[in-house]
Amino acid sequence: MIGLLVADDHPIVREGLKRIVSTYDDIGVVDEAIDGDDVLSKVKNEGVDVVLLDVSMPGPGFLETLRRLRELRPGVRVLVLSVHPEDQYAVHALRAGASGYLTKDHSANELAEAIRKVHEGRRHLTESLQDRLADSLDSGGEKPLHELLSSREFQVFCMLGAGKSVTDIAEELELSPKTVSTYRARILEKTKLSGNAEVIRYAVQHGLS
């Protein structure tokens, strides 16, 4: 039996996922979480094999949650389940340690197959995501600006795009304001954006905030 931790801040979504999973004999929900901190607490349960992680949860942010998950339970696999299209978050999720990325418009059978695949230690990648990953490794051609950033830079970028201050970001990520300011400077240099206003505008246009 694959032990699943369902992490989503919407009770209806969690209930729906539990009902879907209950139809498969080899997958069972052993716990559920409502935010990033809750995930990090409940993943310590030895019965958890796979975390089904939503992108848009309260707490430290899904990339930071992924990073801390990898430190706490490196053997646990993470499948990111999101309403956001692959071109917005998928590459960064995989770079941060996720074993797969699935949008919520897929079928129940596709979800179950993805859970099985990551539990076996494989990656779950759609054909379009495989192409995008190949493109991200190719130095030629133009990429969206946010794909030029490292995982940590992208995390700070999204928080700036949501209108958070350097101080707020530092507190949430447990970093010094100076370190966050350094990340901000790198972000502006790589993206050629002039300041926070342009970062916010870009994030809104690309559904990253």
Image (cartoon, rainbow, N blue to C red):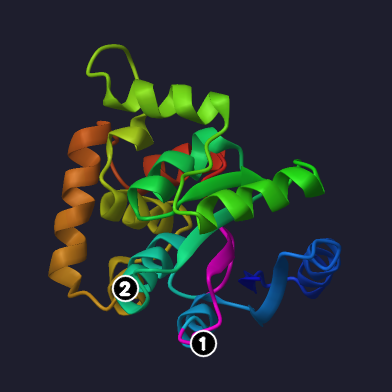
Query: Residue placed at 17% from the left, 49% from the top?
Result: 185
Q: Earlier in the sequence, mark 1 or mark 2?
A: 1
154 relative position to 35: left or right: left
| Amino acid carrying mark 1 in the image | Asn
Q: Position of residue 161 (x, y in %)?
A: 44, 51
Please give the range of residues in magenta: 44-58
Decide: marks 1, 2 in contact (CB < 8 A)?
Answer: no
The residue indicated by pointer 1 is 45
Residue 34 placement: quadrant: bottom right
Residue most extreme to the top: 141
Residue 36 versus residue 123 in the image, above or below: below
Dot 2: what SS? helix
Q: Position of residue 204 (x, y in %)?
A: 54, 42
| Amino acid carrying mark 2 in the image | Leu
Q: Nearer the viewer, residue 158 or 65?
A: 65
Magenta stretch secondary structure, dominant: loop
The residue indicated by pointer 2 is 173
Magenta span includes 54: yes
Numbered disc in front, either 1 or 2 = 1
